[in-house]
Image (cartoon, rainbow, N blue to C red):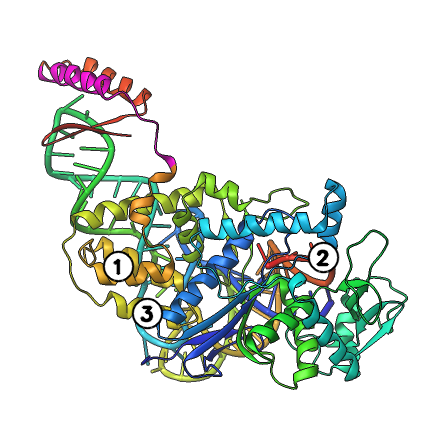
Amino acid sequence: MDKDLYIYNSLNNEKEKFEPINPNQVSIYVCGPTVYSSSHMGHARSAIVFDSIVRFLKFIGYKTRYVRNFTDIDDKIIQRANEEGKTSEEISEKYKEEYIQDMKNLGCATPDYQPSVSENIPEILNLINEILDKGYGYEKGGDVYFSVKKFSRYGELSNQSIDAIIENTRLELNPNKEYDLDFALWKKAKKNEPYWESPWGNGRPGWHIECSAMSRKYLGESFDIHGGGRDLIFPHHENEIAQSECISNQKFANYWIHNGLININKEKMSKSIGNIINIKEGLKAWNKNIIRILFLTHHYRTPVDLSDKKLEEIKKSLLNLKKKLKTNNATSSNFKELWVSAMLDDFNTAKAFGYYFKYINDGKLSDKSEIELKEFEETMGVYGWRDEILASDEIEIVNKDEIEKIILERNKARENKEWEKADLLREKAEKMGIKLVDNQNGTTWEN
RNA sequence: GGCGGUGUAGCCAAGUGGUAAGGCGAUGGUCUGCAAAACCAUUAUACCCCGGUUCGAAUCCGGGCACCGCCUCCA
């Protein structure tokens, strides 16, 4: 690596030079889904963003240790299980598998570790015990809470004072809490809820503690990059920091990367609006590379508006590129240098893709510029788009004989300058989903 | 109200001090019976508004305006 990587760090809202704890290795933890329903395009974006980041880190020579968790114990899972008359485990397993399949279908590389909360209960209990030992938490009525006031840096990530938070937060009324901002490390099991045994009675982990426990297990008490959607900044990531740093007295994560969220037709994607698009639905309508490229042609921190119009535009631009790649003869350029420098500047995939389009359009890249194309496409995870881009909507096989007949008939009409008849025949073919194209070598067709 | 973000051509979107990447669309031309495709060319004297700093600002500072997100579960 002869150049430096800069990353916008949400901790201080500044772009910083990236210096990993170990010179040649990067440890990265990304918050994965709570598996209580099918994953949606927001999950897709996050996964694609961090997939390209990890790919690039590898590309510039780092070894990476990439962890993405499953939150498979949670109130919403329990609720869903009750609604469907199933066990929580059945629900979480189902959606975990779905998620793994969705990620594969999106072309995202599998993280090195994908731990689940349910598989890390001992680690979580240990951590809660340590927090209690150090005096940062308390048990009350079978629940265990984190004492926010004891952690002086609380609010560092979201850049708010405790007073400001308390003033502005819609607080859950809970008589067990000593202070309204305190949050649960362990929740006592209610009747018919799944539970694990603990020193404080039967219960389950609170939301937040799992990420502290699992990141510590797989990456240590201090690691390089922590990622997730920007909606997780408060309270989730704030609470993770408190839980972890009160024990370790070290910086939990050195760099925080938060990806922007998704809008659907300029409206926030949300349950209440009812405009959630699942990954499966998205992939049914659009080739994975079109989806990836839509996300990667936006900077990872800005919101992305998802619409058929946008995806259609990306598709068209790719089809144009594809044609140009075939006819160009270029073999070398400074393309690599440019896109690498774009990526070194806070993973600017949008800029990198700008060069990609420009260079192909200018005839400086072709199918023959294999190394440069391959390196770029593999880093973006879009390798193979040239072959796949049309696969998503190929029309059923048409009757070739019929078409040949139409072409012959039409060409005869054209020879006789019977233009009206010729146009009618072209329209007829169009109705069959076939486009007739006259070129120097005669008439060809495509669907 | 607190915190954060955004405002760049018809639409989308890069650009964090040196004179506006890229995509889609549009327009003109070549080609064509006409189209389509392809190819060539054109497409923001200008970056929400007003001030300021600077030789120089979309970029920095101050003040507005507008929109959005988080603050409740969320990627």
| Residue A129 seen in this snapshot | yes
- Amino acid type, callout 1: Leu
Mark 1 Cα-neighbour bin, 10 Å: few <14, some 14–19, many ≥20: some
Q: Which of marks 1 and 2 is nearer the N terminus?
A: 2
Looking at the image, which residue is at 42% across and 57% down?
A296
Q: In this view, does A285 lie to the left or right of A403?
A: right
- Amino acid type, callout 3: Val
Q: Which of marks 3 and 1 is nearer the N terminus?
A: 3
Residue identified by numbered label 3: A340
| Residue A155 seen in this snapshot | no
Return the chain for callout 3: A
Residue A175 screen position, x and y as percent: 90, 66
**Magenta stretch in the rendered image:** A393-415
Looking at the image, which residue is at 70% across and 67% down?
A121
Instruction: Kindly report the distance in space between the C-alpha atoms of the residues bearing marks 2 and 3.
Output: 41 Å
| Viewer-nearest of discs 2 and 3 | 2
Same chain for the residues under marks 2 and 3 in the image: yes
Q: Is residue A160 magenta?
A: no
Return the chain for callout 1: A
Residue identified by numbered label 2: A74
Looking at the image, which residue sits at the far bottom? A249
Quadrant that contains the C terminus of chain A: top left
Residue A79 screen position, x and y as percent: 75, 48
